[in-house]
Image: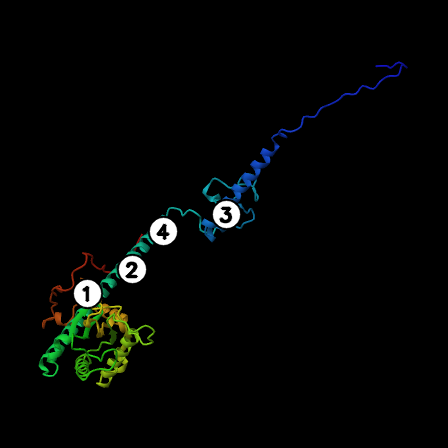
């Protein structure tokens, strides 16, 4: 377009760019690549976690073209990247165990059967040994229980035959527990064994403990001495409580037993239990809760050689249960001198009743030649 002066006016084209909105779909491709890479990464982490070292090595060699003995023969163009032959002679050869074990055949089957038989024998032997140990333990427990029952009867008889201690029969409780033989010297109403609130023992209590010591010293068991009190507390602010009292009374009983001839090394422990194990839980302040317990502990609880004794006894039981070894008799075996009579004739030997005849095969007369 020209103006009044005849000059041409420039033509201006205005292009409006639309703002906002999406910028195409290129970001989707990048995001898909990222997700794929992350999936591959997590698969790699999973494989590293679930595979063994041998399997990792096998996978590495599979993707390594320079790995030794990839194939004993080549096909196609040959070379490292020539591919593998379909024929068996071109199959992959490796000294590393494959990820999936092949089906065994031939001698491998025999070896597998032998291993299974060996495992079964080991399991059977273990079961037999365990049964023998249980039988040995039962035998030991029965013998020990019998000894403790005899000690209980002997102690009861000694109390009844002693004119000075017969009246204290009610102060004595003897029983068999899971831990062993428990002998309890308890207080009765108006018949205490110790001075009130003190570890000072009355003469009759000392005499009774000495008699108990004379009986239990004959047994090989270790003992545990435990002191018990009622739940009557000391006054507020007292530094001496039922814990100290029960421990002092138990230790006082230990001294009486040791002075009477009981071996000190066989005293396993001395404990003060206070009022934590009342004899009469419904009556915590009853006099019978104040007592001294002397426990003949089972050998199983104190003897460190108990397991070894069980093993030895179990071996004896297994040896007794094992059948005698039987050897086969060969038919063409040379006759013994006892089998030849005075005329030089060979007598026919009767088969041993203890050794059965195995098979019907006969020894050949000479060497056998195979074609």
Q: Residue at x 67, y 26 (%)?
A: 18
- Label 2 neighbourhood size at 10 Å, few (<14), some (14-19), many (20+)? few
| Image disc number at residue 207 | none
Is label 1 in a helix, a strand or a loop?
Answer: helix
The reply to whether residue 59 is in sight is yes
3 vs 2, front mark: 3
- Label 4 neighbourhood size at 10 Å, few (<14), some (14-19), many (20+)? few
| Marks 4 and 1, how far apart at CA | 35 Å
Q: Is residue 223 left or right of residue 2?
A: left
Work out whether residue 169 or residue 19 is closer to the camera in this orientation and state it: 169
Residue 52: x and y in percent read: 45, 52
| Image disc number at residue 321 | 1
1 vs 3, front mark: 3
Residue 151: x and y in percent read: 15, 76
Query: Residue beneath label 4, please?
Result: 108
Residue 53: x and y in percent read: 47, 53
Query: Residue beneath label 2, please?
Result: 122
Is label 3 in a helix, a strand or a loop?
Answer: helix
């Amino acid at each position: 377009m020209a103006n009044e002066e005849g000059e041409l006016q420039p033509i201006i084209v205005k292009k409006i760019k639309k703002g906002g909105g999406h910028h195409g779909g290129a970001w989707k491709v990048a995001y898909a690549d990222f997700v794929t890479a992350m999936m591959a990464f997590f698969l790699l982490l999973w494989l590293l976690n679930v595979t063994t070292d041998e399997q990792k090595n096998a996978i590495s060699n599979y993707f390594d073209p320079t790995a030794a003995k990839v194939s004993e023969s080549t096909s196609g163009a040959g070379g490292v990247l020539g591919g593998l032959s379909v024929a068996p002679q071109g199959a992959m050869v490796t000294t590393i165990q494959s990820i999936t074990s092949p089906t065994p055949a031939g001698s491998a089957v025999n070896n597998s059967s032998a291993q299974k038989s060996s495992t079964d024998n080991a399991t059977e032997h273990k079961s037999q040994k365990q049964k023998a140990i249980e039988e040995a333990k039962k035998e030991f427990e029965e013998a020990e229980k019998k000894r403790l029952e005899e000690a209980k009867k002997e102690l009861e008889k000694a109390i009844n035959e002693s004119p000075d201690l017969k009246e204290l029969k009610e102060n004595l409780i003897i029983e068999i527990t899971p831990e062993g033989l428990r002998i309890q010297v308890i207080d009765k109403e108006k018949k205490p064994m110790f001075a009130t609130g003190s570890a000072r023992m009355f003469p009759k209590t000392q005499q009774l403990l000495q008699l108990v010591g004379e009986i239990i010293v004959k047994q090989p068991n270790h003992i545990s001495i435990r002191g018990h009190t009622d739940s009557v507390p000391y006054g507020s602010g007292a530094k001496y409580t039922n814990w100290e009292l029960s421990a002092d009374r138990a230790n006082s009983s230990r001294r009486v037993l040791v002075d009477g001839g009981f071996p000190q090394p066989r005293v396993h422990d001395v404990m003060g239990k206070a009022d934590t194990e009342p004899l009469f839980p419904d009556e915590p302040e009853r006099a019978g809760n104040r007592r001294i317990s002397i426990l003949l502990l089972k050998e199983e609880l104190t003897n460190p050689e108990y397991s070894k004794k069980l093993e030895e006894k179990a071996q004896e039981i297994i040896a007794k249960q094992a059948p005698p070894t039987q050897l086969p008799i060969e038919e063409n075996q040379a006759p013994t001198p006892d089998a030849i009579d005075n005329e030089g004739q060979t007598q026919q030997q009767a088969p041993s009743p203890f050794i059965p005849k195995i098979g019907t095969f006969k020894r050949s007369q000479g060497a056998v030649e195979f074609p």
